[in-house]
Image (cartoon, rainbow, N blue to C red):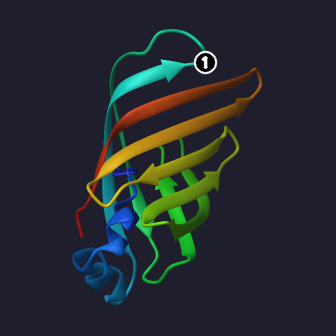
Amino acid sequence: MRKTVLAMALTGCATTAAADIIEKQGAALMSCNYTVECLEEEACTFAQFGHDVDLPKQMPGDAVLDMGTGPAKGTARVVNGVLVIDASDAYASYLLSQTPEGIAKLSVHFAEPLMVVTYHGDCVVTE
């Protein structure tokens, strides 16, 4: 399984290089990798988790997180220079934020049972 840069390379769209990627024909691919996982109010631990993100060619636009359990469809936009993607699938709702430097945070909200898991890592545009 290829790891998807969920880290939302869209954050880079605030920079000239990222703007160039978004202007290309078709969507760009971003790969995200996380090294820290925080479950609810418990202490954070080491993690090895990653995913890909299909970014839109223009912001705001449709984005897809490839979470390994299937696609989570949503919307990507840039807010105050930060790439923000919100998406959902049959399992959870996802909020991915990425700075222009590539720092990424992913929050996964589950309904049954109600809980939130947060991942800390980075994302890069790969295509």
83 or 23: nearer the viewer: 83
Relative image position of residue 95 (x, y in whole percent): 57, 48
Q: Residue furthest front?
A: 80
Vertically, is 11 above or below 40?
below
Q: Element at badge 1?
A: loop
For disc 1, the neighbor class at 10 Å (few under 14, some 14 to 19, many from 20) is few
Front residue of this view, candidates 59 and 14: 14
Amino acid beneath label 1 = Glu
Q: Residue at x 42, y 82 (%)?
A: 57
* Among the 4 quarters of the image, the one containing residue 99: bottom left
Left or right, 23 with respect to 115, comes to left
Q: Is residue 94 visible?
A: yes
User: Viewer-proximal residue, 67 or 62?
Assistant: 62
Give the camera-side residue of 53 and 46: 46
Q: Residue at x 57, y 72 (%)?
A: 62
Count of marks placed on residues: 1
| Residue 68 seen by the camera | no
On screen, 41 above or below 2?
above
Indicate the quadrant containing the N terminus: top left, top right, bottom left or bottom right: top left
Q: Residue at x 35, y 73 (%)?
A: 13
Name the residue rendered at 56%, 77% in the picture. 60
Quadrant for residue 61, please give it.
bottom right
Task: Name the side, left or right, on which 49 lies relative to 109.
Answer: left
* Percent position of residue 56, x then y: 46, 76
* Relative image position of residue 27 (x, y in whole percent): 40, 77
Q: For residue 112, which quarter of the picture?
A: top right
Q: Which residue is mark 1?
A: 40
Q: In the image, 71: left or right of 115?
A: left
Image: 74 above or below 4:
below
Q: Position of residue 50 (x, y in %)?
A: 35, 39
